[in-house]
Image: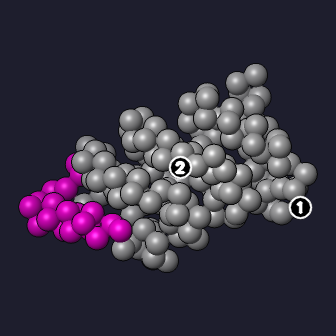
Amino acid sequence: GGPFASQDRVVDSDAEAAFVEEIVGAMPHLICHEFGRHVACAVLEFGGDEHRANTAAHIAEDAFRLSMHRYGSYVVEHALKFCTDEHRTMLSERLLSRPDALEILIRRQAGSHVARALLTLDLSIRQRVVSEVQRLAEELQHTRHGKNLIEDAMAAQARFS
């Protein structure tokens, strides 16, 4: 057991509930920490809806910068995978609010993880990511993360073609 043991039984005592609340309160410090990111990802994957929502709110405050961070990008990726549709939409809108957001995300190794996660969202977002990857394909094919992103984008394109 433990505070994240199952989706049905999130916490099993008041002490564990308080502990999880303390973790969520420390989320801004955990997200970009080498080991803290694992805790943040566990909250997103196994925590209750309220904990996911609070974590998504912390991420949304600086989603783009976190997406470019070596450790923060993993947490943003998890949020795009495990949060509610509403929170995923909010995060993707925050991420893509800059006109050059996708280009910057795609060119950076940390950002490419987040761009890959965006490929799993709704059709309009997938199409934007695929289009930008295609535009930058010549440049991207020279890096490992770029090659992986090209493959993922082409697979996503095949799904909506």
Q: Which residue is under mark 2?
A: 95
Q: Which residues are magenta?
A: 9-28
Of the residues under marks 1 and 2, which one precedes in the sequence?
2
Q: Secondary structure at mark 1?
A: loop
Residue 13 lies within the magenta run: yes
Q: Is residue 157 visible?
A: yes
Residue visible at 56% across and 36% down?
A: 121
- Looking at the magenta stretch, what is its main secondary structure? helix
Q: Quadrant of the C terminus?
A: top right
| Mark number, residue 66 | none
> Where's residue 160, x and y in %?
70, 24
> Where's residue 114, x and y in %?
59, 53
Please state which amino acid type lies under the numbered disc 2: Leu
Residue visible at 43% across and 41% down?
A: 90
Task: Please give left or right for residue 75 compared with residue 107 in the image.
Answer: left
Q: Secondary structure at mark 2?
A: helix
> Where's residue 127, x and y in %?
69, 32
